[in-house]
Image: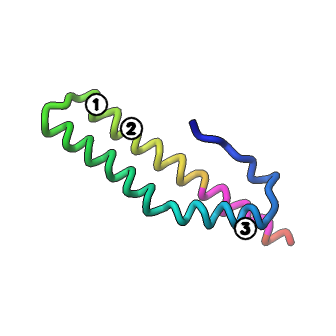
Amino acid sequence: MFIRKSYAEMTLDELVSEEKKMTAQKIPFALFVGLLVGFAIWSATHKGGFMVTSILLIGALLAGSVYSKNLKSVQAEISRRNTVS
């Protein structure tokens, strides 16, 4: 599903490139999460059931959490390398 990269093994240039790629994906990813939340709200108001609504909201929460953790770990590794150098 999600490929976990080892940021400690990447060079500084690769890390900066990865951070730029992730920050460029912020808006499309936010639209995706918003779409999931929108479907969850629609499902809740149109008798879609509790399970469908819950799954959509949990999916949006997990996706946002994974994205945020990956971005923070890249930024932390870049910060760590800049302070060491």
Residue on which disc 3 sits? 79
Q: Earlier in the sequence, mark 1 or mark 2?
A: 1
Q: Is residue 4 left or right of residue 32?
A: right
- For badge 2, the amino acid type reads Ile
Whether 77 is among the magenta residues is yes
Q: Give the vertical position of 85 relative to 36 (above or below).
A: below
* Circle 3 residues within 10 Å: few <14, some 14–19, many ≥20: few
Alpha carbons under labels 3 and 2: distance apart: 31 Å
Can you identify the residue that label 1 sits on? 52
Q: Left of 14 or right of it: where is 58?
A: left
Q: Of callouts 3 and 1, which one flags the residue occurring earlier in the amino acid sequence?
A: 1
**SS class of the residue under badge 3?**
helix
Q: Position of residue 85 (x, y in %)?
A: 86, 72
Farthest right residue in view:
85
Residue 36 in the image, given as x and y percentages of width and height: 33, 45
Where residue 58 is drawn, which disc sits there? 2
Q: Nearer the viewer, mark 1 or mark 2?
A: 1
Q: Amino acid at mark 1?
A: Val
Q: What residue range appears in magenta? A: 71-81
